[in-house]
Image (spheres, coloured by chain):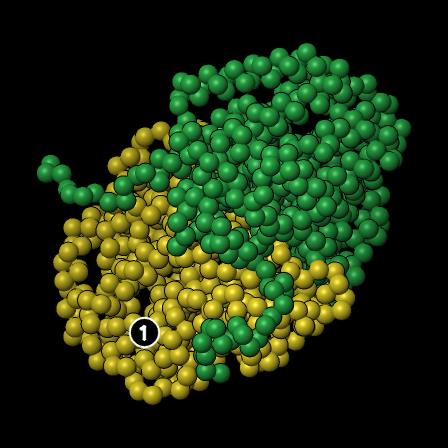
């Protein structure tokens, strides 16, 4: 067919505009791997073709696993296993790890074996008697949904198979859920801040689901009195399960995660009230706010020069929703576009609540993809974008002065984890703006050469 | 010489003998469960993403394109190679499509992709899901092509459908469909085959740049680097060239043979241009069929004069040494064999270690070609190569390497700086662009500099920190 004009083609074909997407989120298989790799003393076996193992490798890096401690394996399914079934290959591979010093082997299945009907539960059940470690099958084919669905699927399998029914309650304790469902590329620092705050309040953390979590913690998860979901994107189902099955009370719900002054204050006060540690919460708030103000007074962040410039936030809900208030209040910019990767009811409700409370009415895109983001950036013309490297390139040709990379993928390399939660988190975000401002001001060429 | 009674030796012989053992099944060409190379889908994507203004339309769930999108598109293409953000489109198949089929959605997606991105080409890539449920991607491509303003091709690239190599080859093969009957012959013009814009860890653009530079000096023009940033227009005219050549015999071979058989375009079979002889062979292998031998000789003489100090240095530095060459996964065994040839050229005795039987199987035609050219180096495979687990395997092979090196006189190690043998280490990591290219005459300069660094600083202490990071502190 000869190439006609683009306008002609567009008029003629009239496609439904939801069949072709350029997604930000990975599949359920990735989310399941990310969750299972948060359990220490375990190994992960991907029952999949070899390509899916690259998603496991990616999850391995995101969970900051150590290759000295954690092994990942793959059944590397080929045509034979797809045609005749891959259960034999799975059994053979499970037997290969018999000698490993692990307490648990997670077996996660990908699209191929699930479509052809491999029964990973049956294989694990059959082999369990001859294995020293626990076998935990997780049916997590990519087509089951996004990475957040995969996190929920894996948490469900892990809790149902491992958490003890008769765990004795630890008074005033907490179970932390889904810290890894967070687009901050160094999210373990967010988790570390939460744990530090809880420690200062004297609130014991019974289990973290999941990051460097020993299997014994998971078995004891039901002993927690409360749970906190550290994500707006995943983990809610696990909190509901713990509540329904074990009476674990979900707390800090319906408020944004602690990014920025007001969100942090609100979150800490909710925590303090629940555990009757209001005084300590107020101390943390007071110290933190003074520290941030002093640091800003000493370093003079340039964000203050960006007063009310139109801003876009393109992120997951976990970072994106709290950023709305932070950008509006603390940085005094005006969100003109909020594009979130997810579109669940709870995400919509929370964002609507925040926008209403702030009196903002930006362009909002739920379940955005790269195409939609680029189009909206073109339409809305924000001058600053809080997003990722993708938005840096998606903004080319549009007069966006600054792209502050705060969510993955990011070009800035971090050897040290940096949190967004809490008071140091505020400084980290200011620093990101500062560095982007510096880069934007940097001259792209020299006007003449020096003589020497 | 190495004592064969060492219990860590899994194979010790030459390349021909290893090939024989792999072919006969005596050495099983299968990687252990903890080592997974890319699947067919990935490698197909690598090739397709090497065409400008193309939409690779992934017919599958979102996990398949996302890895490629993050790694290939954003990090490598946009950040490193200066390529604009190009789409990684996907039909995002879910459970209902797996049950009821996704062909309808695919057809809509093609139309939508055309409307959104205005591409010159759309290539549908099937994944495990769409492959197993039997979606007829080829028919959809044919139907869709009638309704959009660009070519629509389909590639069966299910991850389970073949090894990583089959993805490259199938993708190159489908590009033949874009090559139109020639209206003329472009004199003194060639295609370079086998490139993948997709930044696999086996290649960086510096080597291709060096080839382009030398061809330009001779007066040979390039129609298309297939598929290293070529356009659909260049692919249409690909049959008008006088000759096809490859930056690497291994990767260009399949497409070169196909174009020779189908279109009668001769294909220059040459190895990788590492060192003087191989570079000369590469250039003459291209220039002679074009009748440009004299021009090529002039360029070669001029270039050789310019690198004479480095050539003299390499002769002096490497004569009588044992060159232990280890390039296992990155950038691949063919480079290791090319380096062996270069080391021999400069007077060293090359020993290539830990070429996995798997890679021998994957590269069978190229290995056989290398043997035909007379290169048949000594090879050692150690047991650590077959160890389960990436840490265990690397720790064990490191220990074995250190032991092997001590058994040879005057050894020099060609590999990467992640190894700590008790001898000079020539860091050939392609991750260090400051000494790229390795090909051609500029490559000789860079390799000489790397050898010099290795020899002059071999007494400096190695990093206890990096060693502990890689192999544990115990």
Q: Which chain is green?
A: A
Point 64% across, 31% down: residue? A257
Q: Residue furthest front?
A: A359
Q: Residue furthest right?
A: A166
Q: Nearer the viewer, residue A32 or A120?
A: A32
Say left or right for A246 vs A358. right
- Chain at tag 1: B
Helix, strand or loop under label 1:
strand
Coordinates of residue B254 in the picture (x, y in percent) = 46, 73
Point 40% across, 21% down: residue? A299
Report which residue position mark 1 lands on: B223
Coordinates of residue A432 in the picture (x, y in percent) = 45, 34
Coordinates of residue B460 in the picture (x, y in percent) = 32, 30
Q: Is residue A358 above or below residue B201?
A: above
Q: For residue A143, which quarter of the picture?
A: bottom right
The answer to whether residue B24 shows anywhere in this view is no
Q: Residues within 10 Å of mark 1 (few under 14, many from 20)?
A: many
Point 71% across, 18% down: residue? A272
Q: Nearer the viewer, residue B302 or A331?
A: A331
Point 46% across, 46% down: residue? A382
Q: Which chain is yellow?
A: B
């Amino acid at each position: 067919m000869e190439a006609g004009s683009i306008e002609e083609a567009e008029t003629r074909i009239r496609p439904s505009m939801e069949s072709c997407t350029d997604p930000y989120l990975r599949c359920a298989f990735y989310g399941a791997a990310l969750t299972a790799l948060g359990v220490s003393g375990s190994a992960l076996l991907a029952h999949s073709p070899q390509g899916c193992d690259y998603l496991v490798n990616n999850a391995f890096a995101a969970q900051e696993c150590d290759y000295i401690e954690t092994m990942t394996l793959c059944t590397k399914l080929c045509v034979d296993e797809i045609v005749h079934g891959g259960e034999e290959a799975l059994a053979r591979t499970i037997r290969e790890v018999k000698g490993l010093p692990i307490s648990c082997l997670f077996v996660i299945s990908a699209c191929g074996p699930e479509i052809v009907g491999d029964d990973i539960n049956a294989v694990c059940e059959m082999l369990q008697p001859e294995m020293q470690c626990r076998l935990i099958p997780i049916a997590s084919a990519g087509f089951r949904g996004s990475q957040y669905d995969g996190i929920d699927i894996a948490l469900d399998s892990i809790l149902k198979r491992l958490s003890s029914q008769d765990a004795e309650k630890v008074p005033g304790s907490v179970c932390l859920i889904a810290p890894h469902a967070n687009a901050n590329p160094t999210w373990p620092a967010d988790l570390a801040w939460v744990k530090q705050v809880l420690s200062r309040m004297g609130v014991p953390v019974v289990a973290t689901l999941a990051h460097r979590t020993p299997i014994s913690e998971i078995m004891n998860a039901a002993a927690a009195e409360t749970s906190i979901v550290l994500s707006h994107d995943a983990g809610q189902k696990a909190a509901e399960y713990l509540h329904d099955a074990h009476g674990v009370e979900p707390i800090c719900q319906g408020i944004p995660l602690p990014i920025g002054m007001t969100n942090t204050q609100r979150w800490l006060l909710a925590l303090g009230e629940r555990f009757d540690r209001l005084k300590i919460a107020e101390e943390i708030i007071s110290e933190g706010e003074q520290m941030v103000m002093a640091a800003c007074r000493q370093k003079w962040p340039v964000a203050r020069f960006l007063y009310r410039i139109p801003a876009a936030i393109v992120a997951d809900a976990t970072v994106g929703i709290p950023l709305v208030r932070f950008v509006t209040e603390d940085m005094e910019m005006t969100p003109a576009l909020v594009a979130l990767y997810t579109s669940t009811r709870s995400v919509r409700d929370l964002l609507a609540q925040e926008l209403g409370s702030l009196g903002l009415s930006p362009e909002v895109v739920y379940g955005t993809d790269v195409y939609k983001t680029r189009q909206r950036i073109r339409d809305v013309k924000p001058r600053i974008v809080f997003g990722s490297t993708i938005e840096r390139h998606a903004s080319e040709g549009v007069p966006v002065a600054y792209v502050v990379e705060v969510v993955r993928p990011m070009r800035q390399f971090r050897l040290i984890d940096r949190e967004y939660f809490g008071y140091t988190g505020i400084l980290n975000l200011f620093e990101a703006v500062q560095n982007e401002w510096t880069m934007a001001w940097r001259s792209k060429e020299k006007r003449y050469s020096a003589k020497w | 010489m190495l004592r064969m009674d060492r219990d860590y030796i899994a194979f010790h012989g030459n390349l021909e003998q290893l090939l024989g053992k792999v072919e006969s099944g005596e050495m099983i060409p299968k990687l252990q469960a903890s080592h997974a190379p890319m699947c067919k889908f990935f490698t197909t994507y690598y090739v397709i993403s090497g065409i400008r203004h193309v939409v690779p339309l992934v017919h599958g769930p979102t996990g398949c394109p996302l890895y490629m999108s993050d790694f290939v598109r954003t990090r490598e293409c946009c950040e490193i190679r200066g390529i604009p953000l190009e789409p990684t489109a996907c039909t995002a198949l879910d459970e209902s499509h797996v049950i009821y089929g996704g062909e309808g959605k695919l057809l809509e997606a093609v139309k939508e992709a055309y409307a959104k991105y205005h591409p010159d080409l759309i290539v549908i890539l099937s994944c495990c899901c769409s492959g197993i449920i039997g979606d007829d991607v080829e028919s959809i491509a044919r139907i869709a092509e009638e309704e959009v303003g660009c070519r629509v091709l389909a590639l069966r690239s299910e991850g389970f459908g073949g090894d990583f190599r089959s993805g490259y080859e199938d993708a190159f093969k489908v590009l033949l469909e874009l090559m139109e009957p020639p209206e003329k012959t472009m004199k003194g013009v060639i295609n370079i085959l086998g490139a993948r814009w997709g930044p696999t860890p086996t290649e960086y653009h510096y080597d291709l740049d060096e080839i382009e530079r030398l061809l330009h000096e001779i007066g040979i023009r390039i129609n298309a680097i297939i598929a290293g940033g070529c356009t659909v227009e260049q692919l249409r005219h690909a049959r008008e060239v006088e000759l096809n050549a490859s930056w690497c015999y291994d990767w260009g071979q399949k497409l070169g043979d196909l174009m020779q058989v189908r279109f009668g375009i001769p294909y220059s079979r040459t190895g990788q241009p590492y060192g003087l002889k191989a570079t000369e062979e590469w250039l003459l292998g291209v220039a002679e069929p074009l009748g440009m031998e004299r021009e090529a000789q002039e360029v070669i003489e001029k270039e050789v004069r310019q690198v004479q100090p480095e050539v003299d240095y390499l002769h002096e530095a490497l004569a009588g040494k044992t060159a232990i060459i280890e390039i296992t996964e990155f950038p691949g065994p063919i480079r290791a064999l090319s380096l062996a040839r270069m080391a021999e050229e400069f007077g060293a005795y090359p020993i290539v270690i830990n070429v996995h039987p798997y890679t021998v199987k994957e590269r069978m035609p190229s290995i056989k070609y290398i043997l035909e050219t007379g290169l048949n180096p000594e090879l050692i495979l150690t047991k650590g190569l077959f160890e389960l687990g990436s840490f265990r395997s690397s720790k064990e092979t490191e220990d074995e390497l250190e032991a092997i090196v001590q058994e040879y006189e005057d050894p020099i190690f060609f590999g990467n700086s992640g190894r700590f043998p008790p001898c000079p280490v020539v860091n050939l990591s392609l991750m260090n662009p400051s000494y790229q290219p390795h090909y051609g005459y500029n490559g000789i300069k860079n390799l000489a500099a790397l050898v010099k660094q290795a020899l002059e600083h071999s007494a400096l202490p190695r990093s206890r920190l990096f060693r502990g990071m890689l192999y544990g502190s115990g």
